[in-house]
Image (spheres, helix red, strand yellow):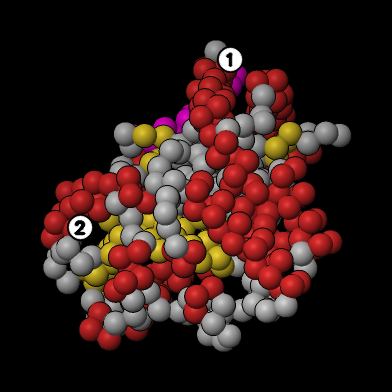
Amino acid sequence: MQTIYFDNSATTALCPKAREAMLHVMDEAWGNPSSRHAIGVTAHNVLKKAREQVLSALGVRGAKEENLIFTASGTEADNLAITGTAHAKKALAGGKIITSDSEHPAVLRTVEALEAEGFRASYIPTKHGVFDMDVFRREMTRDTFLVTVMLVNNETGAVNDIRAISDYAKSVNPDCIVHTDAVQGFLKLPFTPTTLGADLVTVSAHKIHGPKGVGALYISPYMIKRRAVSPIIFGGGQEFSFRSGTENLPGIAGFGAAAAAQSASLEQDIAAMTSLRDRLPAMLADDPILSNIAVNVPQSKERAPHIVSLRMPKIKSETMLNFLSGKGIAVSSGSACSAQSGRISSALLCFGLSEAEADTTLRISLCAQNTEEELIALCDALRLGIKMLARMKR
């Protein structure tokens, strides 16, 4: 049975360029990038090239190598951005952090940990996928030293206006640091750190057809000059002392190659995903059985091109997910991270769904290689699933 894969927000298939770069490192450039001999220099050059490729994909020109720090995941990059900022200056102790109520757990749990240390935090509502700017304006004070808001919500596809958030934050406190978790937006939306007004940007390899176990944090030159981020992992001083530990060179090389490949086709890929994203609700609406499936459409000004959130008609998402899996179709009942906890998705509850509605929601997440024929197969399976599962409930 051939699998149809609609869970690209959880992870993506490794692209040929990334695989090729990783094999090259394992076969020919396997040295330690910190070593001074020829084999180490070869490895260091691979590391340097990958850093340049990811920076280029971020639209950063003329950056120094230290502006991009490789980590073991997007989660670690978020932790470095948030905890590293909070701990960088003693004067920030007890200061205020602003985030949204629907962030990825990598952000929410980190902010909560800082609250336990005595920092204060405000969680801005995001009902229907809209970051509440009125609440934000009330909460944004001169002692707010960090604003961390995701670019794209990983479960609903809502897009936050990071530029507007940054502009207001810095109008109140010019020294306020703005971080965005752009893991779901990187190479899905056209942006640069400058256009976002972000000082810190988190990205991850395995969401862009690179390998798992590699993330990165962009740190602006201004942040480095201010020494506004401190390390959270200590050791031999790799990654310009921001992240010690011998670099995962095969993974980093794959990240760089994937970033370069996806960047080269960004415009076409966005168009392809957007077309499929818009086609699916139309296909559902035209079918007498599938028209009972509701689409959780974000009311944000922008929507990510690759995420569609669907509510099943009184069928639990896990039940339908398992049915579809048996038909060779992979979808998600929410983010992979929330699925691990076994709890109802907090992001969907913050979106405005009831617990019952959130518990019947599936996430369809696309890549540019998906096809309309695969959407037709998904609709056929959903139709069959609704008929069979509804009959079993009687």
Residue bearing mark 1: 287
Quadrant where the N terminus sits is: top right
**In terms of image quadrants, where is residue 272?**
top right
The quarter of the image holding the C terminus is top right
What's the residue at 42%, 54% (across, down)?
Answer: 62
**Relative to 323, does residue 280 appear above or below in the rendering?**
above
Amino acid at circle 2: Ala
Looking at the magenta stretch, what is its main secondary structure? loop
- Residue extending farthest to the right is 1
Number of residues whose C-alpha sits closer than 10 Å to that of mark 2, classed few (under 14), some (14–19) or many (20 or more) = many
Residue 391 horizontal side relative to residue 196, left or right: right
Is residue 355 something one can see in this rendering?
no
> Foreground mark, 2 or 1?
2
Disc 2 from disc 1: Cα separation: 46 Å
| Left or right placement of residue 363 versus residue 372 in this view | left
Above or below, comparing residue 368 to residue 160 in the picture: above
Q: According to the image, label 2 marks what residue?
A: 169
Q: Kindly identify the residue that appears in the image at 14 percent across and 56 percent down.
A: 171
Specify the quadrant of the image occupied by residue 8. Answer: top right
The amino acid type, in three-letter code, at marker 1 is Asp
| Residue 133: % across, % down | 21, 48
Q: What are the residue bounds of the magenta stretch?
A: 287-299
- Check if residue 314 falls in the magenta segment: no
Task: Judge by depth and name the residue closer to the eye, 350 or 119.
Answer: 119
